[in-house]
Amino acid sequence: VRVDELRTPALVVDGDAFTRNLRTMSAALPGPRLRPHVKAFKSTAIARELVAAGHRTLCGATLRELAGLAIIGIGDDLLLANESLDEDHLWEVAASGVRVTVAVDSPETIAVAAAAGVREVLVDVDVGMPRCGCRPTDAGRLAGEARAAGLEVRGVMGYEGHLMTTDPAAKAEQVAAAMEPLAVAHADVGGEVVSGGGTGTYAVNTWCTEIQAGSYLLMDSHYGATEVPFEQALHLVATVISVNRSGGWAVADAGLKALGMDHGDPTIDGARVWFCSDEHTTFSPLDGGPLPRVGDRVRIVPAHVDPTVAYHERFHVVSGDEVIDVWPIDLRGW
Ligand SMILES: Cc1ncc(COP(=O)(O)O)c(C=O)c1O
């Protein structure tokens, strides 16, 4: 099958760019120095590629992601890099027999982990992004509570998500400032693991023993605008369904129901995107270039890879114009 023959909108992954991205990161962070984050691609096929490249420690944001890996037996050290109170679902993952570690930041999440039969936890620490994580000064106490509940405390986690796309000149300093309280918390908690980081900070975060990166494999225009050494491997292929010659715009058949929009509009090489609506992207060629024709295909670069992927059921892996493989996006849902 050729890309031109795909039903649109369709997610395509350039297999060579994907492999280069994978290798670039694996060279920088080999084996367990990287804990690939499956939330960015939600696909066991990609998780298998990572395991084949030596990354057997994986993490996820949802129990669906973790269960999908655990049940098939992909990876041998899985981290739920998130809090959960879903005891039944946690129990299912813990009972799979795979090594499973869960992030905790409260007495409630500790109690649920213990009741679900989870054996190991990381104490999640707030490092400046207003989301999950306890106060650094509470980490030691929570670790004590976890141990008293019979849990093994492997260390700490602290995700500096607010620093992923900051200016490179300021990034190292800001990451250092965010990691300082994590190091203090780690001293109180003990254990060997300091987990955090992502595609935007992996090169400067020297505090974490393992980096939780995921977007680097497929990439998006948000990260593409930063200094990271990864290529755009993912495109959303759409068909031009209408052209307005007097107005100078064209309309493709993919809109915000096929694209994560929280980081803004997607981009199209050589064109200006005007806006997206439910099932449409309106765009015009740059510099007075020719308008496309009805029926032409366009390649849209999503602004945010993770939510874009979650809208779709499969990746079409391509080599040039040929579809050479299909990777199901089988870890969607919760
Ligand atoms: C807990 C956690 N760790 C790591 C990441 C890093 O992901 P990425 O490589 O996409 O920046 C994320 C992304 O949101 C996250 O939520």
Image (cartoon, helix red, strand yellow):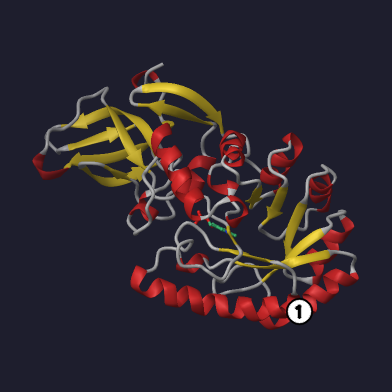
At x 72% / y 45%, what residue is drawn? Answer: 76
At x 26% / y 47%, what residue is drawn? Answer: 274
Q: Of the residues shown, which amino acid type is indicated by label 1?
A: Gly
Report the residue that reaches farthest toward the top: 1
The quarter of the image that holds ligand 1 is bottom right
**Residue 174 seen anywhere in this rendered image of the structure:** yes
Q: Nearer the viewer, residue 28 or 278?
A: 28
| Apparent side of residue 279 relative to residue 43 in the rendered image (left or right) | left
Viewport quadrant of the C terminus: top right
Report the residue that reaches farthest toward the bottom: 137
Residue of label 1:
140
**Residue 135 seen anywhere in this rendered image of the structure:** no
Figure quadrant of residue 19: top left
Q: Nearer the viewer, residue 322 or 112?
A: 322
| Picture coordinates of residue 324, whole percent (x, y) | 45, 22
Figure quadrant of residue 10: top left
| Picture coordinates of residue 113, whole percent (x, y) | 82, 59
| Apparent side of residue 1 relative to residue 298 in the rendered image (left or right) | right
Q: Secondary structure at mark 1?
A: helix
